[in-house]
Image: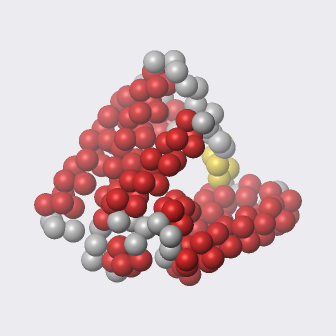
Amino acid sequence: MWGLFFGIIFGFLLHKGGATKYDVILGQLLLTDFTVVKIMLSAVVTGMLGIYFMKARGWVTLSIKSGSLGMNVIGGLIFGVGFAVLGYCPGTIAGAIGNGYLDALVGGLAGIIIGSGLFAALYPKLRGGILAKGDFGDLTLPRLFRVNDWLVVVPVAALLVLLLVGLELAGL
């Protein structure tokens, strides 16, 4: 229920920030409007600090999924094709549907269902092949550097905030 609650809030904020509008997304792709990047970086900083705070308090346990270079390439291609064809990512599709945009409802929802179905159908063949290439397990940056989580989280959050300030000062 918490996931649904926070998902609705995130979708509302995406809409209020303008990330569900075609012109804003197109401006991001043309590197003339960085609204989407600013929204996503803000979400990353907030989510990262919130999750690691909850982890430090013992409220949550992280279940890191294992990953691989092959998984990232296939996932990036699926995401990129969907984004290039329609101009929405899965998060902004939900926000755009909530905003009543017909292209997101028809094209976006159909794309998610068709893409998910194709991936599920191909998964048995991909699992032992390209998805296993470059396996790096359940690695995180704190585990990689063998340091306390906060020694990575705080500097990364600070760098992202500086990037956000820089984008704002540059008028992007």
Instruction: Write down the quadrant of residue 72 in the picture.
Output: bottom right
- Report the residue that reaches farthest toward the top: 58
Instruction: Write down the quadrant of residue 50 in the picture.
Output: top left
Q: Is residue 89 visible?
A: no
Q: What residue is rendered at 52% in x and 21% in y?
A: 59
Q: Is residue 130 above or below residue 101?
A: above
Numbered disc total: 0
Q: Is residue 82 above or below residue 75?
A: below
- Report the residue that reaches farthest toward the left: 169
- Residue 27: x and y, percent? 33, 77
- Residue 48: x and y, percent? 42, 39
**Nearer to the camera, 119 or 67:** 119
Instruction: Write down the quadrant of residue 125 in the picture.
Output: bottom right
Q: What residue is rendered at 38% in x and 53% in y?
A: 13
> The C terminus appears in which quarter of the rendering?
bottom left
Horizontal arrangement in the rendering, residue 66 relative to residue 28 (left or right): right
Horizontal arrangement in the rendering, residue 66 relative to residue 20 (left or right): right
> The N terminus appears in which quarter of the rendering?
top right
- Report the residue that reaches farthest toward the front: 100
In this picture the colour scheme is: secondary structure
Horizontal arrangement in the rendering, residue 57 relative to residue 94 (left or right): left
- Residue 79: x and y, percent? 58, 68
**Nearer to the camera, 69 or 40:** 40
- Residue 51: x and y, percent? 46, 33
Q: What residue is rendered at 52% in x and 41% in y?
A: 5
Q: Is residue 79 visible?
A: yes
